[in-house]
Amino acid sequence: MKIYITSVFVDDQEKAARFYCDILGFKIKHDIPLGEYRWLTVSQTGADDEVELLLEPSVHHAVAPYRSALIADGIPLASFQVDDLVAEHKRLDGLGVVFTQPVTDAGEYKMATFDDTCGNLIQLIEMVK
């Protein structure tokens, strides 16, 4: 068994696609119209065997209170691993990404959290060797 897909709820799929691709560096994997919305996924390189991130419309009535509670408590919705957190933080900061938690040393890893502009907090992790 392996993870195939996971979701982040987004307020605007087009805006999310631009942020996740143009800023974070993901690639569109699937973009299939489904009425008012799209089956819109991204992955690291678009390869067939990669885990996909579904940029899912945040229209379900449970999403708003769920995301509000996470944000109020500073809890990220997702976590992405990077090789060099300090360099990635500097790159993203230079692109205008707003960090809600700066680079923090937590022993075996470093972490930072940013606002994805689509209604979520996302955590970046670097595993310290």
Image (spheres, rainbow, N blue to C red):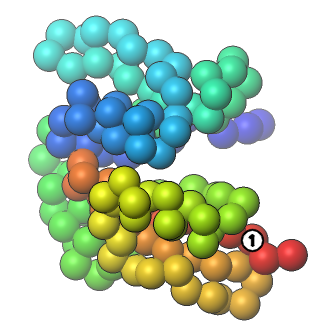
Residue at the farthest right position: 129
Q: Based on the displayed image, in which of its 4 quarters is residue 104 positioned? A: bottom right
Please provide percent x and percent y for residue 82.
65, 58
Q: Residue at x 24, y 61 (%)?
A: 67
Q: Based on the displayed image, in which of its 4 quarters is residue 69 positioned? A: bottom left
Q: Based on the displayed image, in which of its 4 quarters is residue 22 positioned? A: top left
The reply, left or right, for residue 76 in relation to residue 3 is: left
Identify the residue position indicated by label 1 in the image: 127
Q: Can residue 57 be seen? A: no
Q: Residue 5 versus residue 46: which sits nearer the camera?
A: 46
Q: Residue at x 47, y 45 (%)?
A: 24
Q: Residue 49 versus residue 1: which sits nearer the camera?
A: 49
Please provide percent x and percent y for residue 64.
15, 56
Please provide percent x and percent y for residue 40.
38, 23
> Is 47 situated above or below 8?
above
Q: Amino acid at mark 1?
A: Met
Residue at the farthest front position: 94
Q: Residue 98 versus residue 116: which sits nearer the camera?
A: 98
Q: Residue 55 versus residue 22: which sits nearer the camera?
A: 22
Q: Residue at x 57, y 76 (%)?
A: 111
How many residues crowd mark 1 within 10 Å: few (<14), some (14–19), many (20+)? some
What element does badge 1 sit on?
A: strand
The reply, left or right, for residue 45 in relation to residue 22 is: right
Q: Residue at x 73, y 38 (%)?
A: 2
Say which quadrant the N terminus sits in: top right
The reply, left or right, for residue 75 in relation to residue 86 is: left
Q: How many marks?
A: 1
Q: Can residue 63 be seen? A: yes
Please provide percent x and percent y for residue 25.
52, 39
